[in-house]
Image (cartoon, rainbow, N blue to C red):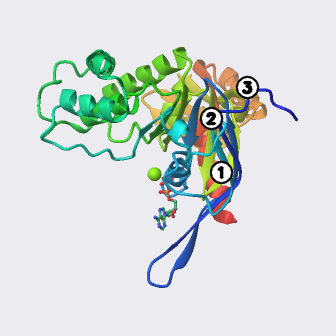
Amino acid sequence: MSTLVEPVIRTVKLCKTYRSGFRMKRVQALSDLELDVGKGETFGFVGPNGAGKTTFIKILIGLTSPTSGEVRVLGKSPRDAQVKTKIGFLPESPYFYEYLTPSEFLHLSARLSGIPGQDVEVRVRYLLKLVRMEDAAHAQMRGFSRGMLQRIGIAQALVNDPELVILDEPMGGLDPVGRKELRDIIIGLRERGKTVFFSTHILSDVEMICDRVGIVIRGRLVNTGRLSEILTEEVESVEITVKGLTGKFRKVLEKVTQQSIRSGDSLFLTVRNEEEVERVMAIVREARAKISALVPRRKTLEDYFMARIREAERK
Ligand SMILES: Nc1ncnc2c1ncn2[C@@H]1O[C@H](COP(=O)(O)OP(=O)(O)O)[C@@H](O)[C@H]1O
Ligand SMILES: [Mg+2]
């Protein structure tokens, strides 16, 4: 297969083994990881703690080298100096010198990243506005909440107007409002054609904003694709609420399904297939009771994710 445009991120058979501790025990953090991320994509790298997400990101930004395999970022080695200027990075737990103000810190970051002196002020103002930190721009970061620090971290990652933005667990420690704001920032980046690669163990984050996701478990990429491809449209179960049942019919219905909950004069049933739905309907008709709700439940990313983790544990 020939590709005219090389992807922004490409890894081929990427492996990383750490040796740690007194006995230099081997930890295989990444195994044969192959991934392409195209220009303009928002890609969510999802996996439980210890799956290898941070290791992969450290390789992408050239902080560590793979044990074997290949990695190319923007068509070159991540160690290439020119490539580094086109990447923005937010580490997992950013730390800032707490006596600086956001404005001072971003001025410093802008200068260090080589932005011409006359443009620094405009750039810093733009970033403070983007992450909604204008009001706190001149307060010392001492005592800032996790959410505020995270926003400063994002601003810093965007200081050089990078083509590729890499965020390691950007939603970590944020409250729902903070997460919503961060999602909006990521959506804004996508609208401006940026490629965004972020890791998370929070599934709802990727469901809302990603073009594609990759699921990594124990250093292996177990699946990649659009969420709509990963999660088939198939119905997992149907939730039926029945009203106006007498005791006798309620007992009959409770035997049809494995899951039933009583609440007042309602019976809440979960059935697994069409056949069971038909049986419930027939009994309800006979009982002259009423179905007040019938809700098909599709597979969620959470169901999928948990199933893959269980599979990996069995191996
Ligand atoms: N510097 C290191 N030395 C030894 N082992 C490490 C090092 N960094 C990570 N690991 C191990 O590699 C695995 C993957 O870790 P990491 O990439 O941090 O996962 P994640 O970010 O998905 O939580 C874990 O088992 C972790 O303990
Ligand atoms: Mg991590």
Q: Quick one: label 3 or label 2, which is nearer the N terminus?
A: 2
Q: Is residue 177 visible?
A: yes
Q: Amino acid at mark 3?
A: Ala
Residue 140 lies left or right of residue 246; in this view the side is left
Kindly indicate the quadrant of the structure image that contains residue 234. top right
Using a 10 Å C-alpha cutoff, classify the residue at mark 2 as few (fewer than 14 neighbours), some (14 to 19) or many (20 or more): many
Which residue sits at x=25%, y=33%?
Answer: 108
Q: CA distance from mark 3 to mark 2?
A: 61 Å
Reading the image, the residue beneath label 2 is 74
- Residue 33 is marked as none
Reading the image, the residue beneath label 1 is 308
Q: Amino acid at mark 2?
A: Leu
Residue at the limit of the structure toward the bottom, as seen here: 23
Ligand 1 within 8 Å, label 2 CB = no
Q: Quick one: label 3 or label 1, which is nearer the N terminus?
A: 3
Q: Amino acid at mark 1?
A: Arg
Residue 307 lies left or right of residue 147; in this view the side is right
Kindly indicate the quadrant of the structure image that contains residue 175. top left
Which residue sits at x=26%, y=36%?
Answer: 149
Which residue sits at x=56%, y=25%?
Answer: 241
Q: Is residue 250 visible?
A: no
Position of the C terminus, as image quadrant, is bottom right
Using a 10 Å C-alpha cutoff, classify the residue at mark 3 as few (fewer than 14 neighbours), some (14 to 19) or many (20 or more): few
Reading the image, the residue beneath label 3 is 282
Say if 133 sits above or below 27 in the image.
above
Q: Secondary structure at mark 2?
A: loop
Q: CA distance from mark 3 to mark 1?
A: 37 Å
Residue at the limit of the structure toward the right, as seen here: 1
Q: Where's residue 115, x and y in %?
A: 36, 26
Eye-nearest disc, 3 or 2? 2
Q: Are marks 3 and 2 in contact (CB under 8 Å)?
A: no
Q: Where's residue 160, x and y in %?
A: 41, 27
